[in-house]
């Protein structure tokens, strides 16, 4: 069984920084794209950043220049360094990954971690 477990969320003042981590575990053959999404109550879940196994990245316009996504393929982990945080970054952040288990390629979600930015 494959699991994605996030950590690193919390409460921070505007202008501060947080680093989110996500660990993939279970019966994993390979991991393709890994990404971070966020969702505010009553709003649609949106892509924040994504990274391919080769290191190509993509960011939402709202976080470009402030957030950095990275991954450690050997450790099966993905990170999101968030700098110059703004109150509008407040949301539940979800880790997402396309994982091949050896017999199937599926998309997986973590349980989410709350990020709250106070003004």
Image: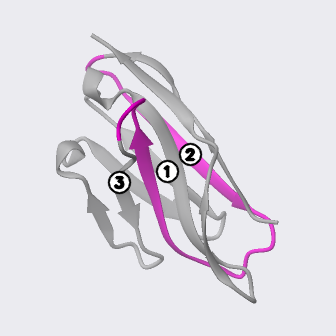
Residue at left 75%, top 64%? 2
Crowding at dot 1, Cα within 10 Å, few <14 / some 14-19 / many 20+, comes out as many
In contact (CB < 8 Å): disc 2 and disc 1:
yes
Q: Which residues are magenta?
A: 14-43
Where residue 17 appears, x then y in whole percent?
37, 28
Contact flag, marks 3 and 2 (Cβ < 8 Å): no
Helix, strand, or loop for circle 3?
Answer: strand
> Splitting the image into 4 quarters, where does residue 105 fall?
bottom right
Q: Is residue 41 magenta?
A: yes
For label 1, the residue is 79
Q: Quadrant of the N terminus?
A: bottom right
The CA distance from mark 3 to mark 1 is: 14 Å
Judging by the rendered image, the residue that carries numbered circle 2 is 21
Which is more N-terminal, label 1 or label 2? 2
Characterize the local packing of mark 2: few (<14), some (14-19) or many (20 or more) Cα atoms within 10 angstroms: many
Q: Is residue 52 visible?
A: yes
């Amino acid at each position: 069984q494959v699991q994605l477990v996030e950590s690193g969320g919390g409460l921070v003042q505007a202008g501060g920084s947080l680093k989110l981590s996500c660990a993939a575990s279970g019966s994993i053959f390979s991991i393709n794209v890994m990404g971070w999404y966020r969702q505010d109550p009553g709003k649609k879940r949106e892509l924040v950043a994504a990274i391919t196994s080769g290191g190509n990245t993509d960011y939402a316009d709202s976080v470009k220049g402030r957030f950095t996504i990275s991954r450690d393929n050997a450790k099966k982990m993905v990170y999101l360094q968030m700098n110059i945080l703004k109150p509008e970054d407040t949301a539940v952040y979800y880790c997402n990954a396309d994982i091949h288990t050896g017999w199937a390629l599926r998309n997986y979600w973590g349980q989410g971690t709350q990020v709250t930015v106070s003004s």
